[in-house]
Image (cartoon, rainbow, N blue to C red):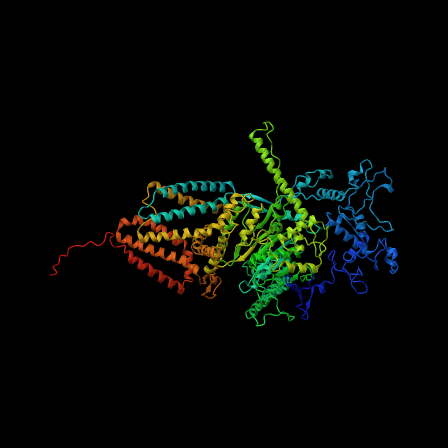
Amino acid sequence: MDTKRRLIAGSHNRNEFILINADEVARVTSVQELSGQICQICGDEIEITVDGEPLVACNECAFPVCRPCYEYERREGNQACPQCRTRYKRIKGSARVEGDEEEDDTDDLENEFDIGGNPHHIAETMHSARFNVGRGSQANASATATPTELDSASVSPDIPLLTYGEEDVGISPDKHALFVPPFMSRGKRVLPMPISDSPMSFQPRPMDPKKDLSLYGYGTVAWKERMEEWKKKQNEKFQVVKHQGGDSGGKNDGDELDDPDLPMMDEGRQPLSRKLSIPSSKINPYRMIILLRIVILGLFFQYRITHPVNDAYGLWLTSVICEIWFAVSWILDQFPKWCPIVRETYLDRLSLRYEKEGKPSELADIDIFVSTVDPLKEPPLITANTVLSILAVDYPVDKVSCYVSDDGAAMLTFEALSETSEFARKWVPFCKRFNIEPRAPEWYFSQKVDYLKDKVHPAFIRERRAMKREYEEFKVRINGLVSMAQKVPEDGWTMQDGTPWPGNNVRDHPGMIQVFLGQNGVCDVEGNELPRLIYVSREKRPGFDHHKKAGAMNALVRVSAVISNAPYLLNVDCDHYINNSKALREAMCFMMDPTSGKKICYVQFPQRFDGIDRHDRYSNRNVVFFDINMKGLDGIQGPIYVGTGCVFRRQALYGYDAPIKKKPPRKTCNCWPKWCCFCCGSRKNKKKKLNDKKKLKNREASRQIHALENIEEGIEGIDNEKSYLMPQVKFEKKFGQSSVFIASTLMEDGGVPKGASPASLLKEAIHVISCGYEDKTEWGKEVGWIYGSVTEDILTGFKMHCHGWRSVYCMPKRPAFKGSAPINLSDRLHQVLRWALGSVEIFFSRHCPIWYGYGCGLKGLERFSYINSVVYPLTSIPLLAYCTLPAVCLLTGNFIVPEISNYASLIFMALFVSIAATGILEMQWGGVGIHDWWRNEQFWVIGGASSHLFALFQGLLKVLAGVNTNFTVTSKAADDGEFSELYLFKWTSLLIPPMSLLIINIIGVVVGVSDAINNGYDSWGPLFGKLFFALWVIVHLYPFLKGLMGKQDRIPTIVVVWAILLSSIFSLLWVRINPFLSKGGLVLEVCGLDCD
């Protein structure tokens, strides 16, 4: 699709479609001027005759028809115009057909009988083959071929002789072969090959006269399929790549190649990945401890419930309820980690299987999505680095397309992407020539490693320095664009040609598409092709719900299906660059595996981050989740989708069910009578299998009927039978009103529908990103990214698993992707708030995993994981209450546990030991350090007492009252140092609950110690339990305390104000409680003095 690097903008609803020329005088070009007239039958552009005029087939109504369709209709059809039914007259350049004898006004002796060499007849033949494909043929190559192709095929040594290269002496040379019509097809119309007078040089194909001709398949429609299968078997035998160090030593005779088991020795045909279970020495003790811990929990709750505290019944009841909830949430989190696994990939086998020497790469195409909204919050330089790492990935360039979604329609993003495309022409060849890692220039030039290690090329140092200068200049240009964008002109932005920027109004603008790189003649500085780079901004209008990021991702799914339609998709955030250039190959080891790849819906990579302080104060790396929980899920049905760094199968996003694996028939009990229970059960199972088989057959038949729909707008036409039109209506209700997009959904292996003109694809691309396209369709309900939550990633993965798909967790040694994370306290809490709010929205929706998706393909332990991912914000209420109990106990002198006996002491000690043992064994098999594990425990308390609590109330307000509450963040500090953002203090209301917990527990400790000192030695024993309880809360909140303190030399004013306020309140409470006075009241004694 050649747009000459110009911006395409338009609105399907308003019937607008314009091409903005940024390099010429401003003008508006319509779609007719772009492409000329379009054939109304096949969608091709109508040719221009030698007179400079468009071809006119019908002189009565001028119905636009291209020459191949005109020739086909005259030779094979009813020889009449499809619109006015007037008989076609022969025009100059066309061969005479029956019925032309009455026409004497056309004199074209040169072309009248030149059938064999006329190029128009070749085009006619190809066009006919394309029609036959639309009517049911399997491949257009089997339906037609040009004489040139037949000549080249005749001399090709790849065509095997049916007598294995030996001529039979019993057959004379002139009768040694039979000619098979090369244009046999299953279609309803077959255009015969035009035969010229000159003999054609076909290669004779000898046959064994002793064999029946039907054995060779001659005269049948399966001839070509059988020949292709035969050639494939021959290639498998003669292209064997043996393992190194084999026993044969390369001395095998040619006869050994005929062994049918020999192809299995080829390393390229071995599995592309394998599962590695955790060693039994690590996992078996872990499982035993889990079971033991459950038993101890049962004994613990038996003791807690049967031994209430009568003096503090409210405190005791509250604590027991909280502990029961903690036990339930632990079970939901623990059991999905029962069968953890790790995976190993074989990139060399992938290359051997799909990248054979001397042949084009057979690796699948991949469309990569990068989403961004506000360039002032998401710096364009970071987005540019992400795009550059994608363009330089180690993958065939013709199979990579990068789509950048600008949901804010910002001209800054557009201009930055234009600069990025120019710099990519220098950066991409530099990366591939010297094989550098990572391929994001900002991170490559900033890494503190020896960049000369393993680099022996003499020109590397010189070119690296030159490239670094180029990148510094590129950064200056990007930063200049950012500084210009700070002040928006009153009339809005204008482009270089004077055209107003279509996205000046962020909430009301047309859809925009710009192809920067790929298929438009732009190559790198070495003349090599570059991957596609396409800018997309979907249409936005007032009154429409655009569904934020999920809506933007669905728009990218549709526009990519129209333009490139790769079978696999990768989505990354704008701040997540490709850190491992072979990341796409790692994913393809799972997706393209012939044995297990068909049931995989997505491959999820772990998130790794740059720019985090060494201590990871707020657990930004989230190592426990990515290295322990996700490995456990991979052993069940696969990891959950986490929003970025994920490679999808496009068909899974369309809401299709996973392919059903055929199971071998079960053994039947023939030795028992038919009335036995086993046979009854088998008959029931047989009936159930029959119903499932019938459903599957209906589904496949339905899908085949869908594939025969009548596609307009430049796609191959087929029979207009009413039975075929009905499924098209169902498809439109599911996918929308774009026939081109519907056709793309039926192509499991991807690819753009053949016969579509560039103009029609541009119109469809603008159509599918229009704001009203999803109305009355299943987008966001069953298709694409699912709507209804700000965490659309959990919902989307959950729906796929409910359709029977499984996912895969891929952890290469070099992290595949790296991103940036908020490292100051306030931003981190707001990030956790958004995640928790999405979980609350799912909990109150119809897609809640507690009650949704039963009877489908979701496994039980996988459901446990999804339930845990949506109910964890509810833990905030018991957690807040439980963290408040120590202070209350210290201030009132009561406790939640009565005087404990030896039996109770053993139970408590066993519980603490089992908790510690579970954590230690998890760290052992997960490869997680104790520092990361402890940081995760600390932030679980911090986030639960703040973000999760606010998310719960905000979700309730949104669901019950329809009120959206937003929390603003205000910066209170400046930038000074490498991790200066770590010390920024931004006040937010999220800080109030943990701050209050911290202060009241500190006050409680002071009060408790003071009370023990005042009451003597006997009060120290009961105090230890209360102090341990309070110190447990304070230690978990310690990172929060450090965040409040900022740097060591200054304390924010707001902290001082809150500390004084809360201290005053609790001081008044202290005076009111007055614990130093006797509980029985004042003791009055007679004074010894005589006052009189």
Q: Nearer the viewer, residue 718 or 605?
A: 718
| Quadrant of the snapshot with the N terminus | bottom right
Q: Position of residue 1050 (x, y in %)?
A: 40, 64
Horizontal side of 135 relative to 324 (left or right) equals: right
Q: Is residue 429 visible?
A: no
Horizontal side of 520 relative to 381 (left or right) equals: right
Q: Position of residue 414 (x, y in %)?
A: 61, 65
Q: Residue shown at 61%/39% (left/top)?
A: 691
Q: Position of residue 651 (x, y in %)?
A: 62, 50
Q: Is residue 562 visible?
A: yes
Residue 67's quadrant in the figure? bottom right
Residue 972's quadrant in the figure? bottom left
Is residue 48 placed above or below 670 in the rendered structure?
A: below
How many marks on residues? 0
| Quadrant of the snapshot with the C terminus | bottom left
Residue sitting farthest toward the bottom? 490
Q: Residue shown at 32%/56% (left/top)?
A: 1006
Q: Position of residue 613 (x, y in %)?
A: 48, 58
Horizontal side of 823 relative to 585 (left or right) equals: left
Is residue 944 placed above or below 164 in the rendered structure?
A: below
